[in-house]
Amino acid sequence: MDKQKERRLLQLAVALACLVPLCAGTAGVVQGISMIESAGAVPDLESHFRYLSGLLLGLGIGFAVSVPTIERRSELFMVLSFTVVVGGLARLCALMVFGMPGTPYVLAFGMELVVVPLLFVWQRRVALAFRS
């Protein structure tokens, strides 16, 4: 198989596969816990909560990996930052529908919608300075 054909097949496979998290993520943002039909079932909630916690852990690991060569990690930093901001916006949707959450979640808003965007801008500035 030539490399262009293989590239196209990979692109198609990834485009199809990304429909799952796009649809599930959208459903979670819009429907909240009710997206899980058996939301009252502890195993379902535990599974979903732990999965989302694993994603959060993965984001933290990704940011940590960027630290040693942060001036060369713009693409990684951008993807991680974008992901955190999208999560913060989803959390904001919950605030508008259900009201103000507890203090830890308000502090999370600050990280997701203020601190991370500021760190992103700062990283870009440092990266540009190192290109010169």
Image: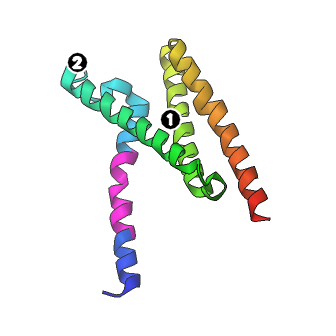
Question: In this figure, which colouring scheme has been used for the structure?
Answer: rainbow
Identity, as a three-letter code, of the amino acid under mark 1: Gly
Residue 69, disc: none
Give whichever of 3, 36 is nearer the camera. 3
What is the secondary structure assignment of the residue under circle 1?
helix
Helix, strand or loop: magenta stretch? helix
Residue 111: x and y in percent read 60, 29
Give whichever of 103, 27 is nearer the camera. 103
Residue 12 is a magenta residue: yes
Identity, as a three-letter code, of the amino acid under mark 2: Gly
Please report the bounds of the magenta region as a residue range. Answer: 11-22
Res. 100 visible in picture: no
Residue 4: x and y in percent read 41, 83
Mark 1 or mark 2: which comes first in sequence? Answer: 2
Q: In which quarter of the image is the N terminus?
A: bottom left
Residue at the image position 71 percent from the left and 45 percent from the top? 121
Residue 89: x and y in percent read 55, 32
As drawn, 98 above or below 81: above
Res. 6 visible in picture: yes
Is residue 80 shown left or right of residue 57?
right
Is residue 61 shown left or right of residue 9?
right
Please state which of the two labelled residues, at mark 1 or mark 2, is closer to the viewer.
1
Cβ atoms under marks 1 and 2 closer than 8 Å:
no
Residue 40, disc: 2
Residue with the mark numbered 1: 87
As drawn, 84 above or below 108: below
Alpha carbon distance from label 1 to label 2: 24 Å
| Residue located farthest toward the bottom when viewing the structure as drawn | 2
